[in-house]
Image: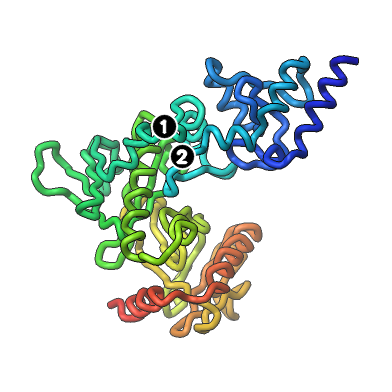
Amino acid sequence: MAKERSRDALLSLLPKEGNQVCADCGAPDPDWASYTLGVFICLSCSGIHRNIPHLSKVKSVRLDEWDGAQVEFMASTGNTAMRAKYESEIPPFYYKPTFSDCLLLREQWIRAKYERKEFIYIEKQEPYSAGYREGFLWKRGRDNGQFLTRKFVLSEREGALKYYNKNDAKDPKAIMKIEHLNATFQPGKIGNPHGLQITYLKDNSTRNIFIYHEDGKEMVDWFNAIRAARFHYLQVAFPGASNADLVPKLSRNYLKEGYMEKTGPKQTEGFKKRWFTMDDRRLMYFKDPLDAFARGEVFIGSKENSYKVLEGLPPPTQGNHWPHGITIVTPDRKFLFACETETEQQEWISAFQKVIGRPMLPQEYAVEAHFKHKP
């Protein structure tokens, strides 16, 4: 009877505000808990908590036995109270991962919160909030595909991220302006659990570099240092904007990536398989997912400006091996693509519709004009 009372008392805590989602990643209906930290968490985060046993001990809310003292502790703590304690000093630019983010981001977030207490003690945020960072990262070679160590320097004062091909080199191999910088974790694509893809604009074309570090904390610190630099740049560029306006602009994941077939502008040549990346309004295609430069880019505007996406290909299109077509209509021409499966086709159409359904911003008209005047 005592065990049943404890179980019922524990289950009665789950509907309380804050406890309905995982304390760490926001996944709905958490049914695990750390009975030493006093938080309800999802199955995925419980696995990360198990790796810090000196701090967190976890149990299933429904399957394990709970004694009265443990249930009392959970009742006196809970997700809302513990967030107030462990997340009291999160910088606005710091990336808070969700359940759909990669394991590295979620693991380092949990360790930063509970193990390192970075959001209780501001001085522990120095690695990513100082405005300057330098160190060595493994970078994929553009031509040979080998990863070699390169020195990277991020400087808010100079407004740039730079890397050097030789340790003693005076001049950097590349200067990436913070204004045009994006960083997104791509462990599957890069083939490393800590893999980060950095993109920047060079002559208004997208350039990719792929990096990693053996130490997960080091890589996430670089990621948040880039977000911090972007945040401070945007604060100056848009002085009236609120944090809520700026934070979504700090870094972005791609709307969609994957293989499609494409044909040329005259639509008479055969379809070729290419890797496509949808980065906001830029649809880029590559021969290989890890190419440094896109083979081509297409600007996707809004429906108010006569852009639309259609299911299927205009008759009598020939040359595509894959059966599920997509037609993008722009003011100047039509772009034809083919997907291998209907699921892929629908996912791409959904990504295109999301962008086309959004009105264009003033600065996006300048980007569109550049695309129209590309040689």
Q: Check disc 1 and report its element: helix, strand or loop.
A: loop
* Residue in front for this viewpoint, 366 or 274: 366
Task: Choose the circle earlier in sequence order: 2 or 1.
Answer: 2
Decide: is 212 above or below 183.
Answer: above
Q: Dot 2, crowdedness within 10 Å: few (<14), some or many (≥20)?
A: some
Left or right: residue 63 versus residue 148 is right
Q: CA distance from mark 2 to mark 1?
A: 7 Å
Q: Is residue 104 above or below residue 245?
A: above
Q: Amino acid at mark 1?
A: Tyr
Q: Amino acid at mark 2?
A: Glu
Task: Name the quadrant containing residue 121.
Answer: top left
Q: In this rendering, does residue 200 appear at all?
A: no
What is the crowding at mark 1: few (fewer than 14 residues within 10 Å), some, or many (at least 20)? Answer: few
For the residue labelled by badge 2, is the local secondary structure a helix, a strand or a loop?
loop
Whether pointer 2 and pointer 1 mark residues with C-beta atoms closer than 8 Å, the reply is yes
Residue 155 point in image, percent of width and height? 23, 48
Q: Which residue is tagged 2?
A: 89
Query: Residue 87, image x and y in percent?
Result: 51, 37
Q: Is residue 106 above or below residue 331?
A: above
Residue 309, x across and y down, in percent: 57, 74
Q: Nearer the viewer, residue 219 or 30?
A: 30
| Image vertical order of residue 353 relative to residue 113, above or below | below
Q: Position of residue 23 (x, y in %)?
A: 62, 36
Q: Residue furthest right?
A: 1
Quadrant, the C terminus: bottom left
**Which residue is the site of mark 1?**
121
Q: Which residue is nearer to you in this view: 61 or 215?
A: 61
| Residue occupying the point 37% across, 38% down | 221
